[in-house]
Amino acid sequence: MERLHQQQRSVQVPVPSPQSPFMTSHHEHLGISPGATPAEIKAAYHSKLREFPAHTYPEEFKAIRGAYEALRKGETIQNEDFLKIRPLEAELNPEILKQVREKAIAQLEVSLDDLIRATF
């Protein structure tokens, strides 16, 4: 009976891995909702680190750390993307362009008399 009891203790129950194929998003790795606040993300991260210590579960630890970093940096990436310089995309109306060109040419037309007066 004692031997059977010892064998039952040595059997390990599989712990769900954060790298499970069913977990696809960083939020699922940390066990939080997509609308979680930064404080909730940090609390979930520390909770998962206690559940999956690095020395015991190195692969799970890497996945948890990666998910946390991605979520933490995701906010800064959005801010950086907002400030990113993008090329200007605009279409010019041909009619307006024609009018502007005619006005510019009209202002550039200078008579010889005007040139002589401006020079001397």
Image (tube, helix red, strand yellow):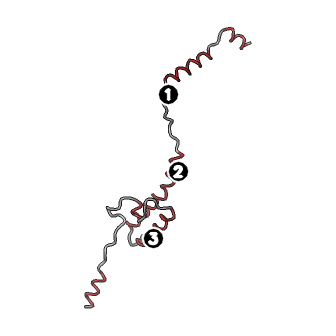
**Residue 108, horizontal then vertical, whole percent:** 62, 16
- Quarter of the view holding residue 99: top right
| Amino acid residing under circle 1 | Leu
**Residue 18, horizontal then vertical, whole percent:** 37, 65
Residue at image mark 2:
79
User: For mark 3, does the 10 Å Cα neighbourhood hold few (<14), some (14 to 19), or many (20 or more) residues?
Assistant: few
Helix, strand or loop for disc 2? helix
Helix, strand or loop for disc 1? loop
> Measured along the vertical axis of the image, is residue 106 above or below residue 93?
above
Q: CA distance from mark 3 to mark 1?
A: 56 Å
Q: Identify the residue at image location x=39%, y=72%.
A: 56
Does label 2 or label 3 sit earlier along the sequence? 3
**Residue 42, horizontal then vertical, whole percent:** 49, 65
- Which residue ends up furthest to the top in the rendered image? 113
Contact between labelled residues 1 and 3, with CB atoms less than 8 Å apart: no
- Quarter of the view holding residue 12: bottom left
Residue 47, numbered label: 3
In the displayed structure image, the side of residue 52 where residue 97 appears, left or right: right
Q: Identify the residue at image location x=49%, y=23%.
A: 94
Q: CA distance from mark 2 to mark 3?
A: 28 Å
Does label 2 or label 1 sit earlier along the sequence? 2
Q: Identify the residue at image location x=52%, y=50%.
A: 79
Which of 63/81 is in front?
A: 81
Q: CA distance from mark 2 to mark 1?
A: 31 Å
Residue at image mark 1:
92
Does label 3 or label 1 sit earlier along the sequence? 3
| Amino acid residing under circle 2 | Asn
Q: Identify the residue at image location x=44%, y=63%.
A: 65
| Amino acid residing under circle 3 | Ser
